[in-house]
Image: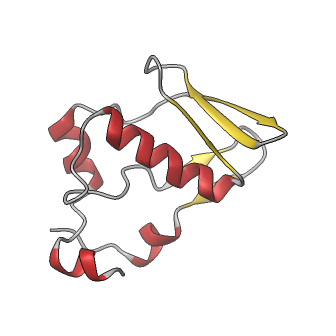
Amino acid sequence: MSLFRLFFPQKNPHYIKREYNIPDKIDWEIQLNKNGLVAVSKDLPGLVTNANNPRELLEMINDAVLEYFNVSKFDSDYIFDTLDLAGHGTVRLKQAKAQKQYA
């Protein structure tokens, strides 16, 4: 846990979704190219992010969605703790496993 989160605990992801009207599920088109993985939201126009690996992609998706809905960094680092890779497995967010404590 970061020092920042000791002073400003992560709020419950369900609370953040409800408070900021974030959908419970967002469909993504994920492509592999020479630069890594690219995720394009099928539900939210203009929402695109990329990463080098699936775990990083989940972190980047969370960051992109939080920015899209103007969620303060004081409130949340993530709202989605898993990413289903359409038959290629599931990625879980490491910090979500360790941090089940909400403000």
Q: In this view, does 84 lie above or below 56?
A: above
Q: Position of residue 51 (x, y in %)?
A: 65, 48
Q: Is residue 53 above or below residue 18?
A: below
| Camera-nearest residue between 36 and 44 | 36
Query: Which image quadrant for residue 65?
Result: top left
The residue that appears at 29% across and 53% down in the rendered structure is 13
Q: Position of residue 10 (x, y in %)?
A: 25, 65
Q: In which quarter of the image is the N terminus?
A: bottom left
Residue furthest toward the top?
Answer: 45
Residue furthest toward the right?
Answer: 34
| Camera-nearest residue between 3 and 91 | 3
Q: Where is residue 3 in the image (x, y as percent from the top left)?
A: 28, 83
Badge count: 0
| Relative horizontal placement of residue 42, taking residue 7 as reference (left or right) | right
The residue that appears at 43% across and 49% down in the rendered structure is 80
Q: Is residue 86 above or below residue 45?
A: below
The residue that appears at 33% across and 43% down in the rendered structure is 66
| Camera-nearest residue between 34 and 16 | 34
Q: Quadrant of the C terminus?
A: bottom left
Query: Which image quadrant for residue 95?
Result: bottom left
The residue that appears at 21% across and 60% down in the rendered structure is 11
Residue furthest toward the front?
Answer: 35
Q: In this view, does 92 lie above or below 51?
A: below
In this picture the colour scheme is secondary structure
Q: Position of residue 73 (x, y in %)?
A: 25, 56
